[in-house]
Amino acid sequence: MLDQAVKPLPVQTPAQLTAALSSLAGPPDLALAAHHAVYADKPFVDTAFPAAAATLAGTLDEATIARVQWKRLSELCSSEQLAIFSAPLDASDMVQGRLGDCWLLASVAALAQRAPQRLIQVFLTREVNRVGMFTVQLYVGLEMTRVTIDDMVPCLKEGSEWKPVFARSRQPEEMYVTMTTAHSCYYLDISCHIVSLAA
């Protein structure tokens, strides 16, 4: 649960990010531990959000869907560079992409700008792992909902590079923007209630 007593702290430098991550103790990532116990290092596959054309129906036109390839985030950036968060952590990180989720991005941006430590607390998984499995906790109204996702995202080729179709960070190694939008919009009927966490 998010700590309502936390005061906003800037996360503009790597040192501030490291301090924020170390000071914000969170509940254990039980989903990741359970996966490791059964499957060891086998990549996690999110069956509720399959990497398939049918998953994108209604969000993109058929011609665009035909050009989509699903990529793990580790295929878009060097695994050594990938991070859930990268300093500076602020509202300018976000690039919306082709999904009409400006309402959710506005909420995420408000947290990044006004209370970045609260945004960090949304993630139970705060470090990149070899199986590509991450758990986030979002609030629908006042009820916390945990969502476990993989790191497969739909991508389109831009020039010589593949880019996520939906929201992404301006910093290519930073994962949190993509992870809180593309998958969460599929799972949850979220309204702007998440903004209240930044107040």
Image (cartoon, helix red, strand yellow):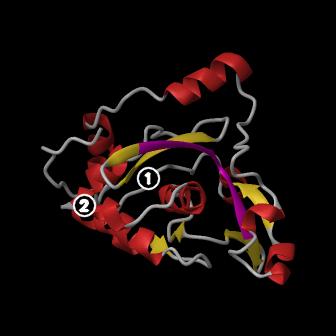
Q: Secondary structure at mark 2?
A: helix
- Residue 40 sits above or below residue 87 on the image: above
Q: Nearer the viewer, mark 1 or mark 2?
A: 2
- Residue 135 sits above or below residue 16 on the image: above
* Mark 1 to mark 2 CA distance (whole Å): 21 Å
Q: Earlier in the sequence, mark 1 or mark 2?
A: 1
Q: Residues within 10 Å of mark 1 (few under 14, many from 20)?
A: many
- Residue 57 sits above or below residue 16 on the image: below
Could you tell me which residue is drawn at 30 percent across and 35 percent down?
22
* Mark number displayed over residue 85: 1
Q: Amino acid at mark 1?
A: Phe
Image coords of residue 31 (percent x, y): 55, 29
Q: Residue 131's quadrant in the figure? A: top right
Image coords of residue 2 (percent x, y): 27, 42
* Mark number displayed over residue 65: none
Could you tell me which residue is drawn at 17 percent across and 45 percent down?
4
- The secondary structure making up most of the magenta span is strand
Is residue 154 inside the magenta stretch?
yes
Image coords of residue 150 (percent x, y): 65, 45
For the record, the magenta segment spans 145-155
Image coords of residue 127 (percent x, y): 49, 39
Could you tell me which residue is drawn at 28 percent across and 56 percent down?
116
Q: Amino acid at mark 2?
A: Ser
Res 115 visible: no
Is residue 188 inside the magenta stretch?
no
**123 to the left or right of 150:** left
* Mark number displayed over residue 196: 2
**143 to the left or right of 136:** left
Could you tell me which residue is drawn at 30 percent across and 50 percent down?
142
